[in-house]
């Protein structure tokens, strides 16, 4: 893996230049979480892309993996259901020590949501929370079936071990949205709720611009 790294306060930021295989990412997160817990490495925000794949969280239902799904499926210990990862999607794996951040998992998840919302605002997109639907959503206006059309632009799934977090969030930048068709994303089958990306919203942001927005927004939400 070819990467660049810098430290902001007590948090290291690492950016990968090429896609990282999912098993390799899991192994690297496991090592870093253990080191953070032992006090031998700083907290880490790891920015990367994966090759096309699906992940199954601890609440994933087999029926939500559609027949003929084209990409490999990896089981993972994060919360949540099925989601897609692939090129053009910014993954932000956050390995943070909640022992110095309040030891409150629910607050941590809310902070992750606030982080994404603040980053999207810097890119000209209004992201919103929805009660009962994890992730960040964009209101697309009235839906022909009634109510509002709402598309998910970012997914969140976390795991916490001995008060150190891993996994994190995925933000759709310019990924191929048809790749979500192999799953019921996050178990939500209501036709009014889909997926979107910055590109689909008309935002032609580079991954570097997305990373800058994430870095700026992080310091506004989390202590660094």
Image: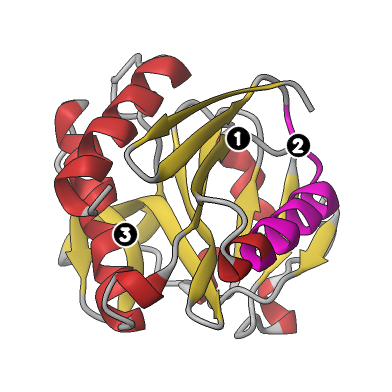
The picture places residue 28, in percent across and down from the top left corner, at: 75, 51
Q: Are marks 1 and 2 in contact (CB under 8 Å)?
A: yes
The picture places residue 126, in percent across and down from the top left corner, at: 14, 42
Please identify the quarter of the rendering in which residue 175 is found. top right
- Circle 3 packing at 10 Å, graded few (<14), some (14-19), many (20+), is many
Judge whether 82 appears above or below 90 on screen: below
Q: Which mark is residue 148?
A: none
Q: Residue at point 21% right, 26% down? A: 123
- Circle 2 packing at 10 Å, graded few (<14), some (14-19), many (20+), is some
Disc 3 secondary structure class: helix
Q: Which mark is residue 48?
A: 1
- Give the prevailing secondary structure in the magenta stretch: helix
Disc 2 secondary structure class: loop
* Residue 46 sits inside the magenta stretch: no
CA gap, disc 3 to disc 1? 17 Å
Judge whether 57 appears above or below 199 on screen: below
Please identify the quarter of the rendering in which residue 17 is found. top right
Q: Which mark is residue 112?
A: 3
CA gap, disc 3 to disc 2? 22 Å
Q: Is residue 140 visible?
A: no
- Circle 1 packing at 10 Å, graded few (<14), some (14-19), many (20+), is many
The picture places residue 119, in percent across and down from the top left corner, at: 24, 37
Label 2 sits on residue: 20
Span highlighted in magenta in the image: 19-34
Q: Residue at point 56% right, 63% down? A: 39
């Amino acid at each position: 893996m070819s990467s660049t790294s810098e430290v902001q306060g007590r948090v290291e930021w690492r950016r990968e230049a090429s896609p990282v295989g999912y098993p390799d990412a899991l192994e690297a997160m496991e090592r870093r979480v253990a080191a953070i817990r032992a006090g031998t490495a700083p907290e880490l925000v790891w920015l990367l892309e994966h090759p096309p794949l699906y992940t199954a969280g601890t609440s994933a239902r087999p029926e939500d993996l559609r027949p003929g799904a084209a990409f490999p499926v990896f089981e993972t210990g994060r919360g949540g259901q099925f989601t897609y990862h692939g090129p053009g999607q910014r993954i932000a794996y956050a390995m943070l020590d909640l022992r110095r951040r309040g030891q409150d998992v629910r607050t941590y998840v809310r902070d992750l949501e606030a982080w994404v919302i603040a980053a999207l605002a810097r890119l000209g997109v209004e992201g919103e929370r929805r009660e009962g639907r994890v992730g960040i959503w964009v209101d697309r206006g009235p839906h022909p079936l009634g109510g509002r059309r709402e598309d998910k632009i970012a997914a969140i799934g976390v795991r916490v071990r001995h008060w150190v977090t891993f996994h994190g969030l995925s933000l759709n930048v310019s990924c191929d949205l048809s790749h979500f068709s192999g799953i019921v994303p996050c178990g939500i089958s209501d036709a009014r709720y889909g997926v979107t990306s910055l590109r689909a919203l008309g935002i032609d942001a580079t991954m570097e611009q997305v990373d800058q927005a994430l870095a700026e927004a992080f310091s506004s939400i989390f202590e660094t």
